[in-house]
Image (tube, helix red, strand yellow):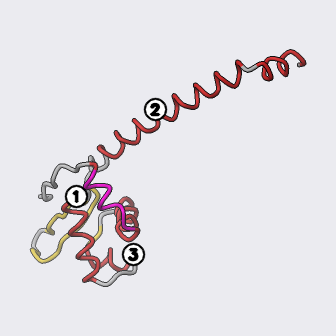
């Protein structure tokens, strides 16, 4: 049974993702869940460093850990399916702001006398 992760928050997600090594771990785990040893090899990291980074990702709720049946020592790590929802929601707000800014700029540019003259010449 997978460990139930904490509910990710935007601040926790950004803090965890602020490190390039942890982002690489997430990219790797997006392809397939992996055991700690496999993940350490995939991202070229020592087991000790990997453990510290995994702890941060688990604490932020971005990564789940699941035990393997018949061997309590083995853990398989995967990206939590809903982990990036706060980040996606925030980015959607930022995108909406930029979309509005660009539409306003386009409307302004198209209403300028210079633009109307160029349009009339065509």
Inter-mark Cα distance, 2 to 3: 35 Å
Q: Position of residue 9 (x, y in %)?
A: 23, 49
Residue that extends furthest to the right in the rendered view of this protein = 121
Q: Quadrant of the N terminus?
A: bottom left
Q: Is residue 117 left or right of residue 75?
A: right
Q: Which mark is residue 43?
A: 3
Residue at image point 15% right, 53% down: 6
Residue at image point 25% right, 69% down: 54
Q: Is residue 83 left or right of residue 4?
A: right
Q: Nearer the viewer, residue 43 or 120?
A: 120
Q: Is residue 15 magenta?
A: yes
Q: Secondary structure at mark 2?
A: helix
Q: Which residue is mark 1?
A: 60
Inter-mark Cα distance, 1 to 3: 20 Å
The part of the chain drawn in magenta is: 11-19
Inter-mark Cα distance, 2 to 1: 26 Å
Q: Crowdedness of circle 2 by 10 Å Cα count: few (<14), some, many (20+)?
A: few
Q: Crowdedness of circle 3 by 10 Å Cα count: few (<14), some, many (20+)?
A: some
Q: Earlier in the sequence, mark 1 or mark 3?
A: 3
- Which image quadrant is residue 31 in? bottom left
Which mark is nearer the camera, 2 or 3? 2
Q: Position of residue 105 (x, y in %)?
A: 62, 28
Q: Earlier in the sequence, mark 2 or mark 3?
A: 3
Q: Is residue 55 magenta?
A: no
Q: Nearer the viewer, residue 39 or 6?
A: 6
Residue at image point 29% right, 62% down: 16
Q: Which residue is mark 2?
A: 96
Q: Do labels 2 and 1 touch, CB within 8 Å?
A: no
Q: Nearer the viewer, residue 46 or 118?
A: 118
Q: Crowdedness of circle 1 by 10 Å Cα count: few (<14), some, many (20+)?
A: many
């Amino acid at each position: 049974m997978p460990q139930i992760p904490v509910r990710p928050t935007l601040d926790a997600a950004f803090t965890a993702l602020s490190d390039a090594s942890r982002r690489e771990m997430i990219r790797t785990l997006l392809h397939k869940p992996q055991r700690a040893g496999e993940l350490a090899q995939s991202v070229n990291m020592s087991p000790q460093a990997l453990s510290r980074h995994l702890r941060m990702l688990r604490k932020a709720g971005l990564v789940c850990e699941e035990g393997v049946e018949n061997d309590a020592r083995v853990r398989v790590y995967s990206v939590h399916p809903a982990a990036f929802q706060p980040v996606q929601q925030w980015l959607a707000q930022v995108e909406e702001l930029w979309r509005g800014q660009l539409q306003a700029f386009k409307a302004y540019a198209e209403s300028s006398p210079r633009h109307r003259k160029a349009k009339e010449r065509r």
